[in-house]
């Protein structure tokens, strides 16, 4: 079989992925084996592969491929999320470009466009994952808007409503004026922004006096329905019971008293705008204030805004400040830094807004999720430090606003049979709703045409919180074989940014619907950042295209590059050099394979002692590494596992083992050693396969003709066996001896082809087991142990053992004596300067301890070097 000179990643990657798919290795069905299950964090259907996906899915693929090798029935369920806000925004933008306004369409017409868009672009990211090597069970691919998935969401809503956990409420919500929908508290990102504090003058009714209030939002004065003072603030005693006049609109509003007002902030007077501030709404309810909503759904002003009607809130802010100044109602402005809520999806500034919405009560639902992570440890977060974040969120949880003013998503299954807010029933379909409505109204004449379904859609997270159950049909049929076999899943790999959005909510849903945890371990990856520690993003232009990286460095190279520095929960400072390192590792493995396969094999020559020793050592080393790997995987230190394998293959296998067993130039290798070399290589490939699937499968298949049942992907993970740790430590000592020989060869220009003699004084009684290795790798013609120092020899020490290389004609003794004498004189001079410093009382008393210790170390090193040089000179004379 001809082995290519170079590893052609592009050809190999497509070849083996097609082979794996053709042989259906990724697919799983329930059987007698223990299941190992991962559900993918479903990327947005709008998405394309970015570096975060690359890291997250590489880790999942490593876990699933390793589980497959360990004999588990490995099932990795892929899929995408319908991403209601993001997808609807993209479809609306597409329609706008075509001259179509969403508001001119019916819901059915719009959804037709949304499905067309999804069908055209929705599978992009999953196809890209295949380029990475992701071994997902593609036959199980799910989409959160699949009919069965939507049915699960609707059933969940109806069930929770019937349990009294879902209710409809008129509440102050977070309004995204760009997406024109409400958001949950968790979807609002608070950012520090520099703005202005406007000091406005309100006239006191019936007098020429005025009071001053400070606000960051002067445009909201049109919604003011009171001024509030603290009853204990003596500055404003004269205002009690009076009224004020709102500038520009002229509305007369009461001056109320409440201890809520902070006398230290601003002017001590507070404008109350119940329709546009959560705290003002609470004050308004307490004091029975009028509610005046001044905004349209896109945050332009409505008719209450008078001549500003139709203008955007930020435009009005600039223009109204000018008008207030002109009429003498603006006292002053100051620069002010405050936290502004923005939409996680659209980045628009959030507007507090009163609205009828659907809410899920969380107080009781959350308790099992708190217990399982923070008390019993049934679910473990890796790294553990994220438990604090988890605890903070769940211990301070509020009712979940689950309705969205969108069309793309599962439509809320509430059906109105009258005009009143409470005139509705909740059911899985309109036929069931009709039965309930007839009962509720006692009107048997009602028909489905009398029912009108709620126009809002459910929050996307309300769909994806069911993901580990709904992908196996567990909501619709809790007795389904798939659900009973694969649930609960094993590991979840995701980012800490959705620890509450998704992870915590899946845990809550798992206990509510299945009575048990949805997974056992949560591996939280870090963010991928650039060398300047900036989060990678398209807007910054600092995120490389993952497919370009794969094209340049190979999928295996990129996978290794990412994972070498991806410890759980810690951010990655990404550098393309990491991928280059991964590619170099691929080349190293490829060249090692080529070297082995290039040897001529003989059945007639005996196995050298050095090869026998080398094999015993490497088998022990592999077992030691395997124990480390298992321990690291157990602790979810995936990068440490890879580093252990990397060192084993690069250092121990390539740099030492192959050198130890390599036959002499143009000589054959014995068949026993060759067979063991192949066995060790195959073990290495098994350990490497989860990390580097393409390269390892290619080499595996080139080693021998394999049937589909013998492919590496379905091979067997090496078994942990007892090993002799002393063999490993003894070899470390031998490495130092070999290094000493090589140093002398280099320093004295003794070519490796010239054999040398070696004598040693083994005062520590170190094992001589590896002497055959020292002899081979040092090209030693004779190696013996002596009891006394050898005259006329070069020497070096390994711990307290001394080794001697007798001088041959290869060394010019006189030149060597001259060189050593010069070095001795220099070192003595250096020692003298150090001693001068240390004898200087002023220096010793004044120097920092660190500096003083450094000088003492220099002194000790110089003395040791002088002793060694003098010893070498004595041996030459």
Image: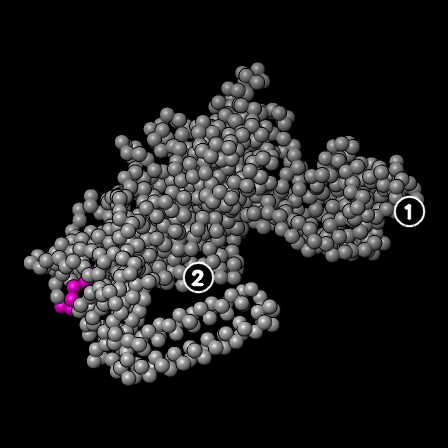
Residue at the far left in the pictured view:
604
Determine the secondary structure under disc 1. Answer: loop
Q: In the image, what residue occupies the spot 28% across and 56% down?
A: 730
| Residue 747 place in picture, x, y as percent | 31, 76
In the image, residue 352 sits, relative to residue 669, either above or below, namely above
Crowd rating for badge 1 (residues with CA inside 10 Å; few <14, some 14–19, many 20+): few
Q: Which mark, residue 209?
A: 1
Q: In the image, what residue occupies the spot 41% across and 62% down?
A: 576
Residue at the far right in the pictured view:
207
The number of numbered badges drawn on the structure is 2
Determine the secondary structure under disc 2. Answer: loop
| Residue 489 place in picture, x, y as percent | 39, 36
The quadrant of the image that shows the C terminus is bottom left
The Cα atoms of the two marked residues, 2 and 1, are separated by 65 Å
Q: Which mark, residue 339?
A: none
Q: Quadrant of residue 661?
A: bottom left
Q: Is residue 353 magenta?
A: no
The colour scheme of the drawn protein is one colour
- Is residue 8 toward the left or the right of residue 144 in the image? left
Magenta stretch: helix, strand or loop mostly: loop
Crowd rating for badge 2 (residues with CA inside 10 Å; few <14, some 14–19, many 20+): some
Quickly name the residue at label 2.
Answer: 575
Q: Which residues are magenta?
A: 661-666
Q: In the image, what residue occupies the spot 33% across and 83% down?
A: 818
Dot placed on the residue nearer the N-terminal end, 2 or 1: 1
In the image, residue 243 sits, relative to residue 840, either above or below, namely above
The quadrant of the image that shows the N terminus is bottom left
From the viewer's side, name the closer residue of 545 and 85. 545
């Amino acid at each position: 079989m001809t082995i290519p000179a170079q590893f052609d990643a592009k050809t190999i990657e497509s070849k083996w992925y097609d082979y794996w798919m053709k042989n259906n290795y990724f697919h799983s069905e329930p059987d007698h084996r223990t299941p190992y299950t991962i559900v993918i964090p479903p990327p947005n259907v709008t998405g394309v592969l970015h570096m975060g996906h690359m890291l997250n899915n590489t880790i999942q693929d490593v876990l699933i491929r390793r589980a497959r090798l360990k004999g588990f029935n490995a099932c990795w369920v892929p899929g995408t999320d319908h991403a209601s806000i993001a997808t609807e925004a993209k479809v609306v933008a597409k329609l706008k470009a075509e001259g179509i306004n969403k508001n001119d369409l019916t819901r059915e017409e719009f959804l037709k466009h949304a499905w067309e868009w999804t069908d055209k672009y929705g599978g992009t990211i999953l196809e890209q994952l295949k380029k990475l090597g992701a071994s997902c069970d593609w036959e199980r691919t799910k989409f959160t808007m699949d009919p069965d998935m939507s049915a699960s969401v609707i059933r969940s809503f109806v069930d929770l409503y019937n349990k009294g956990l879902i209710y409809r409420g008129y509440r102050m919500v977070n309004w995204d004026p760009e997406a024109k929908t409400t958001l949950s508290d968790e979807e609002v990102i608070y950012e520090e922004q520099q703005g202005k504090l406007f000091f406005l003058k309100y006239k006191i009714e019936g007098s020429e006096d005025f009071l001053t209030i400070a606000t960051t939002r002067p445009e909201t004065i049109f919604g003011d329905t009171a001024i509030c003072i603290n009853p204990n603030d003596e500055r404003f005693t004269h205002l009690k019971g009076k009224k004020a006049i709102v500038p520009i609109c002229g509305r007369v509003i009461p001056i109320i008293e409440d201890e809520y007002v902070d006398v230290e902030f601003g002017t001590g007077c507070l404008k109350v705008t119940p329709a546009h501030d959560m705290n003002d709404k609470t004050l308004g309810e307490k004091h029975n204030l009028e509610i005046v909503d001044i905004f349209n759904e896109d945050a332009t002003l409505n008719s209450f805004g008078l001549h500003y009607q139709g203008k955007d809130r930020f435009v009005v802010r600039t223009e109204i400040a000018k008008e207030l100044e002109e009429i003498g109602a603006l006292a002053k402005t100051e620069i002010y830094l405050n936290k502004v809520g923005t939409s996680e999806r659209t980045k628009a500034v959030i507007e507090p807004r009163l609205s009828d919405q659907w809410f899920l009560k969380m107080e009781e639902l959350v308790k099992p999720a708190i217990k399982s992570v923070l008390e019993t440890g049934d679910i473990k977060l890796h790294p553990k430090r994220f438990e604090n974040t988890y605890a903070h969120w769940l211990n301070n949880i509020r009712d979940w606003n689950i309705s969205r003013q969108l069309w793309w998503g599962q439509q809320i299954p509430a059906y109105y049979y009258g005009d009143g807010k409470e005139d509705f029933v909740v059911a899985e379909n309109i036929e069931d709703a009709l039965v309930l409505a007839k009962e509720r109204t006692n009107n048997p004449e009602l028909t489905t045409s009398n029912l009108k379904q709620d126009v809002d859609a459910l929050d996307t997270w309300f769909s994806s919180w069911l993901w580990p159950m709904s992908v196996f049909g567990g909501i619709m049929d809790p007795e389904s074989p798939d659900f009973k076999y694969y649930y609960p899943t094993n590991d979840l790999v995701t980012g800490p940014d959705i620890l509450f959005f998704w992870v915590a909510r899946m845990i809550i849903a798992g206990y509510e619907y299945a009575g048990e945890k949805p997974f056992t371990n949560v591996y939280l990856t870090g963010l991928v950042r650039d060398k300047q520690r900036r989060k990678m993003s398209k807007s910054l232009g600092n995120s490389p295209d993952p497919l370009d990286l794969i094209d340049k460095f190979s999928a295996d190279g990129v996978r290794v590059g990412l994972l070498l520095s991806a410890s759980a929960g810690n951010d990655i400072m990404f550098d393309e050099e990491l991928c280059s390192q991964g590619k170099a590792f691929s080349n190293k493995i490829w060249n090692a394979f080529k070297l082995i396969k290039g040897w001529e094999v003989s059945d007639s020559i005996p196995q050298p002692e050095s090869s026998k020793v080398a094999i015993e050592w490497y088998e022990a080393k592999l077992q030691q590494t395997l124990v480390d790997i298992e321990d690291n995987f157990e602790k979810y230190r995936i990068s440490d596992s890879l580093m252990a394998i990397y060192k084993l293959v690069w250092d121990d296998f390539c740099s030492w083992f192959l050198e130890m067993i390599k036959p002499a130039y143009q000589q054959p290798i014995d068949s026993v050693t060759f067979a063991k070399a192949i066995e060790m290589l195959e073990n290495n490939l098994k350990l490497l396969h989860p990390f580097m699937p393409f390269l390892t499968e290619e080499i595996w298949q080139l080693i021998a003709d394999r049937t589909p049942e013998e492919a590496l992907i379905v091979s067997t993970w090496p078994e942990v066996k007892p090993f002799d740790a002393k063999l490993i430590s003894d070899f470390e000592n031998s490495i130092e001896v070999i290094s000493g020989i090589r140093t002398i060869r280099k320093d004295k220009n003794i070519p490796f082809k010239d054999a040398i003699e070696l004598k040693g004084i083994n005062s520590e009684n170190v094992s001589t087991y590896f002497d055959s290795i020292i002899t081979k790798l040092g090209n030693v013609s004779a190696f013996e142990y002596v009891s006394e120092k050898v005259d006329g020899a070069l020497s070096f020490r390994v711990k307290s053992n001394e080794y001697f290389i007798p001088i041959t004609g290869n060394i010019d003794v006189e030149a060597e004596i001259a060189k050593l004498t010069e070095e001795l004189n220099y070192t003595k001079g250096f020692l003298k300067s150090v001693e001068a410093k240390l004898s200087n009382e002023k220096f010793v008393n004044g120097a920092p301890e660190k500096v003083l210790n450094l000088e003492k170390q220099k002194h000790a090193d110089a003395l040791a070097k002088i002793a060694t040089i003098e010893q070498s000179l004595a041996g030459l004379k």
